[in-house]
Image (tube, grey):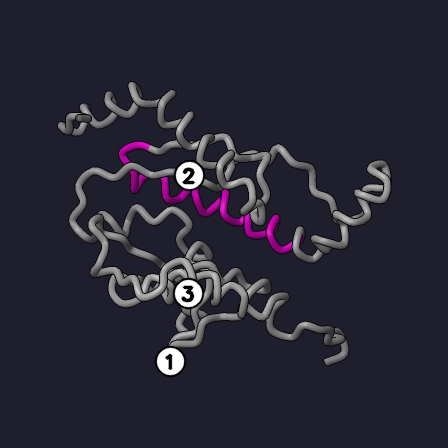
Amino acid sequence: NAIFDKGLPLVSFFRGRRLNQVLTDVFADLQFEDLRIPFYCNSTDLNSGRSVIFESGYISTALRASVSLPGLFPPLQIPPYSLVDGGILNNLAGDILRSRGFSRVVGVNVTPMEDDRSSQTSPDFSEGVEGLFDYFRRPPVLSIITRSIAVEGRELLRSRLADFDFILNPEIGSFDLFDFHRHDEIFAAGRREAANRMEDLAEALARTGTALD
């Protein structure tokens, strides 16, 4: 085709082998049936264009499918499915819980409606050599893909708000999708939001006839 000049990689930026290993190391043989609290994990099938919900089998397999961001990690192939990130179709899946019989649903939104970070697709030479190193550690193609997903996710989220009785919105706009090393800060942001909104949550649930113990 005259307008498509192929470049590497052809399928995804990362091969996904390290991701597979991390999930295996963390979850080993843990299955949905082993969990005390019910867990549902959604993914998107590229072949049918529909959501596929995991609720049995290995946790590592479900998460591998659900975190496969298109362009970053290759789809998980489970014939007849080709599975990628569930957030492509449903990034705050309260409807799944409703369909499983849960009458009261509280959500935690981790897709900031506003982003505290500016988009950077070129080296920040004002930071000297360190800025250049940051640029090459996380090439601009990754920023473009992740910000595109974030923008789309915000619009999708607005259509899902009615599925919840209450939504917590921790302040995580300053964190990047790949800030795994900052997980303690992210957890702390979630705890702060929950503590600050506890009274509001109790009032919201009281309106539905549910007491917050």
Q: In 3D space, how far apart are the residues under numbered discs 3 and 1 (Cα atoms)? A: 21 Å
Circles 3 and 1 in contact, beta carbons < 8 Å: no
Residue drawn 53% across and 70% down?
17
Residue 111 position, x and y percent, is: 49, 41
Q: Is residue 139 above or below residue 180?
A: below
Q: Quadrant of the N terminus?
A: bottom right
**Considering the numbered disc 1 on the image, is that residue within a helix, a strand or a loop?**
loop
In-image side of 67 versus 9 (left or right): left
Task: Look at the image and say whether residue 153 sits in the magenta stretch.
Answer: yes
Give the residue pinned by disc 1. 79
Residue type at tag 1:
Pro
Disc 3: CA contacts within 10 A as few (<14), some (14-19) or many (>=20) = some
**Mark 1 or mark 3, which is nearer the start of the sequence?**
3
Residue 151 can be seen in this image: no
State which mark lies toward you, 3 or 1. 3
Give the residue pinned by disc 2. 109
User: Start and end of the magenta stretch?
Assistant: 144-166
